[in-house]
Image (cartoon, helix red, strand yellow):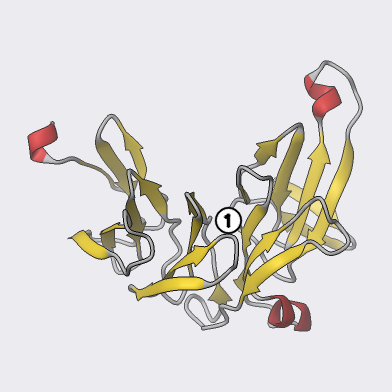
Amino acid sequence: MLSDVGDQEVSIENSVAFRNGIAYFANSGGLVQGWDISDLLDGGTKYHRVFRFWTGDDTDGSIVIDDEGFLYVASEYQRFNERSQRLGQLMKLDPSKPDDPIVWSIPATEIGFEGAGGSWSTPALNGDFVYFTTAAGRVMEVDRHSGDIVWELDIGSPAIASPVVVDDVLIQGDCTGALYAWDVSSPRKKPKQLWKMQFGGCVESTPAVWHGWLYVGTRLGQIYGIADPAGK
C-alpha cells in the first residue's frame, strides 16, 4: 500500500492496530498516524485523523497497543537524520498527548542490516514488559512503565524477525537461520535458553503458534511445523 507524504511516495508495510474506534499504522517515512473510524464502523461516512507523529525514519514493524492505550513503536535507523538520532528507535507513545506523545525512548543505532540500524520488527508485549529486537541482534526486555532495559541478549545479525511470547516463552529468529526460545516466566531475571534450532535460511517471519505447534518460514521458501514429540 502506498501513501503520499509531502512530495514523497512512501509505503505502508505493517498491519493496522485498532483500539476504541481508532486505527493506527505507520509508513516507510516514519509517520505514525491514528484515524478515528468509529463512524465508518457504524455505517457512516465520516473519519478523521486524531494522531500524527514522525519517528524520523522507516517504520516497518506494526504498532502495538497496550491495555491502557499506549503505543509501542520500533523504527529503523537508515536516514541518519537529526530527529531519529534525538528520538531513538524504540519508543512508547501516548496518543492522548498528540503535541508531546513521547513517554520514553531507547536508542538503537548499531548498524546491523544493509548499512542501517534500528529495528525492522514489531515489539511484543507480555504483562508489564515489552520485547524489542534490533537489526544488530539485540533482544531486549524493557519495563513498559519506566522504559528501563531489564536485560539484553545478543543473537545473530541481522535480526529482522519479530519476537513473540507464548505461555511465558519468548521466541525469536535471526538471519543466521537460528530460532531461539527463552523462559521469561521470571521476567526480572535474565532468561534461561530452553532450546535453539538451526535452519538453512534467514528466519525473517514472525513465528505463529496454533494448537501446540510452532510454525515458522525462512527466506529459502520453506515453512516448518515444530512440536514437542510428547505433545503431538
Residue at left 71%, top 65%?
A: 103
Residue at left 32%, top 47%?
A: 216
Going by the image, does 2 lie left or right of 112? right
211 relative to 71, above or below = above
Task: State the residue lying farthest toward the left.
Answer: 230
Q: Quadrant of residue 156?
A: bottom left
State which quarter of the image contains the C terminus.
top left
84 relative to 209, above or below = below
Residue 28 appears at what percent x and percent y? 69, 60
Q: Is residue 73 visible?
A: yes
Element type where label 1 sits in the image: loop
102 relative to 207, above or below = below
State which quarter of the image contains the N terminus.
top right
167 relative to 100, above or below = above
Type of amino acid under label 1: Gly
Q: Quadrant of residue 41?
A: top right
Q: Is residue 218 visible?
A: no
Q: Which residue is mark 1?
A: 61
Residue at left 31%, top 53%?
A: 185
Q: Quadrant of residue 97?
A: bottom right
Residue 37 appears at what percent x and percent y? 81, 31
